[in-house]
Amino acid sequence: MQFLGHRDFNAPRVRRVVRDADYSWSGNTMMTLYSGTTCPFSHRCRIVLYEKGMDFQVIDVDLFNKPEDIAVINPYNRVPVLVDRDLVLYEANIINEYIDERFPHPQLMPPDPIMRARARQLLSSFEQELFSHIDALEKNLKSADKVRGHVRDRLSELAPVFSKQKFMLGDEFSMLDVAIAPLLWRLDHYGIELPKAGAPLMKYAERIFSRQGFIDALTPSEKVMRR
Ligand SMILES: N[C@@H](CCC(=O)N[C@@H](CS)C(=O)NCC(=O)O)C(=O)O
């Protein structure tokens, strides 16, 4: 596994496609994210890493030619996977909470236990209501049309919130915004069109898309998903 060196804070991170990589992680001291180049879950983790501005490396995993070694580090054989010395984590939200606690600035989960519990509840609702359908959209399964309608309706319900506030939890960017951003970025790509009433949600989406951390986190394949 290659070490990419220290971060120049003005430069976007180096990203490389790894096919014949050495996936053994012993001895590597840099936090490493194995990330799918078009994977919305990996996208979430990249956003958090870039928002934090600490040292890390991203290894691009080609999901159409997935290295067998991913199954060695994740029994579910999926990305994202985070390796931090002896710690190996999978599940995007778990990875993101770990990064947030390890590098508390800027803090993305609310500091107050009650608000934090609410945030986790909402993260769970996003998974159940929206992200559980990603596979159907990614693979354009038979159910994709029904799913498009479902996702459109759930997002339209959220839209009025953004007439009153800048971000999901108020005026501060948080883990909730990170969690939903990859879906908002992919709406055109998935063929999901919001009704006019969805305009405040799309304004909110643009606020996220203009953040430097969000821009830096995009892979070349993601950049072309939105016109
Ligand atoms: N619930 C998981 C979902 C991860 C997931 O579904 N990853 C997909 C790519 S987006 C994957 O690796 N699929 C296996 C494959 O394509 O072979 C998470 O939050 O990390």
Image: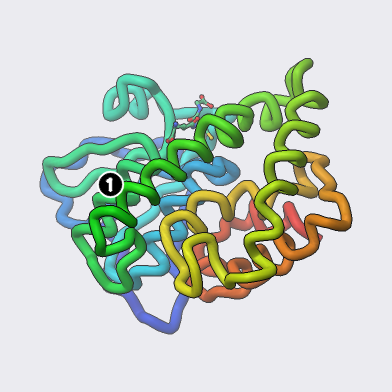
As helix, strand or loop, the secondary structure at mark 1 comes to loop
- For disc 1, the marked residue is 1
Q: Quadrant of residue 165?
A: bottom right
Residue depicted at x 79% and y 24% = 146
- On screen, residue 206 versus residue 169, left or right, reads right
Residue depicted at x 31% and y 68% = 107
- On screen, residue 150 versus residue 101, left or right, reads right
Q: Residues within 10 Å of mark 1 (few under 14, many from 20)?
A: some
Residue depicted at x 33% and y 59% = 109
Between residues 72 and 215, which one lies in front from this camera angle? 215
Q: Position of residue 179 (x, y in %)?
A: 49, 50
Between residues 107 and 197, which one lies in front from this camera angle? 197
Q: Position of residue 30 (x, y in %)?
A: 21, 57
Q: Residue furthest bottom?
A: 10
Between residues 148 and 10, which one lies in front from this camera angle? 148
- On screen, residue 117 versus residue 177, left or right, reads left
